[in-house]
Amino acid sequence: MRRSVLHHAERLQAPLLLFIGGGYAGSVFHRTHDELTAALRRLGKPFIYDVVPNAGHNFVLYTDSEPARYAYSRHMRFLREHWPPGGAAADTEPAQDRDATTAPADND
């Protein structure tokens, strides 16, 4: 789909946080995310790709679940590190988390 972020990754100007449920290993969702993260690495775009163990499709909707609580906490930490865009926090690298992959920031 041409409107997918995959086809416009070069236009991203801020770090990206991606979550996916670990319960779907090998699914089309994982393959799509693999393609996106490969493009982000190739372009030197900063991102975190977090595969959340024991999380299924739409896991963030189950707010009392451990995967949703983890994602919320990680999301809020990401925002504290990267908001506002271009602010002082933008010069710091995101913290590594379990199963998270971080591409190096392009500091040119």
Image (tube, rainbow, N blue to C red):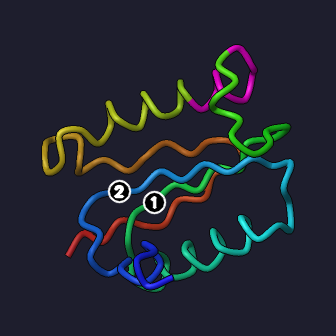
User: Would you say 24 lies left or right of 43 here?
Assistant: right
Q: SS for tag 1?
A: strand
Q: Crowding at label 2, few (<14), some or many (≥20) Cα neighbours within 10 Å? A: many
> From what the image shows, is residue 100 above or below residue 2?
above
> From what the image shows, is residue 65 above or below residue 67?
above
Q: Crowding at label 1, few (<14), some or many (≥20) Cα neighbours within 10 Å? A: many
| CA gap, disc 2 and disc 1 | 5 Å
Residue 17 spot, x, y in % from top left? 47, 51
Q: Main secondary structure of the magenta part?
A: helix
The residue lying furthest to the top in this view is: 64
User: Going 38% across and 71% down the picture, which residue do you hit?
Assistant: 45
Q: Which residues are magenta?
A: 64-71
> From what the image shows, is residue 69 above or below residue 27?
above
Residue type at mark 1: give it: Phe
User: Which of the marked residues, 2 or 1, is nearer the chain's N terminus?
Assistant: 2
Residue type at mark 2: give it: Pro
Q: SS for tag 2?
A: loop
User: Going 17% across and 40% down the picture, which residue do you hit?
Assistant: 84
Mark 2 in CB contact with mark 1 (< 8 angstroms): yes
User: Going 75% across and 47% down the picture, which residue do you hit?
Assistant: 21
Q: Which residue is mark 2?
A: 15
User: Going 63% across and 51% down the picture, which residue do you hit?
Assistant: 100
Which mark is drawn over residue 47?
1
The answer to if 25 sits in the magenta stretch is no
User: Would you say 79 lies left or right of 103 here?
Assistant: left
